[in-house]
Amino acid sequence: MLRFDIATHAVRRNQLTRGAGVNVSLLAAGIHLLPGHRVRADAHDKREVSMDPTRRTLLKASLLLPLAALLPMSLLSSFAWGQATAKDMQTLTLAIHNESGPHRLEVEVAETAPQRQRGLMERESLPEANGMLFRFESEQSANNAFWMYRTLIPLDIAFIDANGRIVAINTMQPCESSTPSDCPSYPAGAAYHSALEVNAGYFAERGIKVGDCVSIPEEAGYCQPAD
């Protein structure tokens, strides 16, 4: 599941050009022209590099590198957001406090842009007591929204303010369309500092609602439950 900003159209859809061909060029191979080199067009308007024999030999050797070695470099530069996986994400335990709680969850922490952009995309299941916590460096606008492009499971999302209080809850359904623009968005409706995604129905089944408190015991973070 992905996040974007409706107000500024900083939409992650712009970063979802999936399946685009990879252009293996000199720059993609990490090759740059040195001072004194020049580029000229021949009679067929092809472009070639004029350089001394030693440099030409080095260039040819570089261009003969296996394509398989070049593709990951290009993919990382073009689609870095897609490389975040559960393996490189911090995990921690948080607790949601209400009349029937505390309710403890093991969550993956999405705190970099690539991690937040990927979210729970393409996960076929999520254990009942697991979730994903989206952390931001600053308060997020009420107009910022999440969407479910390429997300396979229904999710609940709780938006949490800087004091650890839940300020909004939404239920989000998977988007079956392969066209990103066809997927609905789910704005927070209230300013928030983090967001918690869990399986759909988790909050309702436990009576968790707006105003309840979220704490992270191992970090002594967020709100403190009432005595």
Image (cartoon, grey):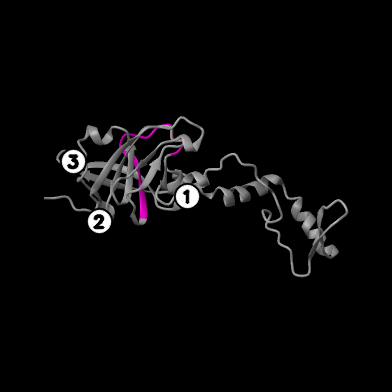
Mark 2 neighbour class, 10 Å CA radius: few under 14, some 14 to 19, many 20 or more: few
> Sequence order check: which comes first, mark 2 or mark 1?
1
In magenta segment, residue 127: yes
Residue 101: image tag: 3
Q: Tell me: residue 223, above or below residue 2.
A: below
The amino acid marked with disc number 3 is Gly
**Badge nearest the viewer, 1 or 3:** 1
The residue tagged with tag 2: helix, strand or loop?
loop
Mark 1 neighbour class, 10 Å CA radius: few under 14, some 14 to 19, many 20 or more: some
- Residue where numbered disc 1 is placed: 114
Residue occupying the point 51% across, 32% down: 178
Q: What stretch is highlighted in magenta?
A: 121-136
- Residue where numbered disc 2 is placed: 220
Residue occupying the point 51% across, 34% down: 179
Q: In which quarter of the image is residue 95?
A: top left
The amino acid marked with disc number 1 is Pro
The amino acid marked with disc number 2 is Ala
Residue occupying the point 62% across, 50% down: 74
- In this view, the residue in front, 211 or 109, is 211
In contact (CB < 8 Å): disc 1 and disc 3: no
> Sequence order check: which comes first, mark 1 or mark 3?
3
In contact (CB < 8 Å): disc 2 and disc 3: no
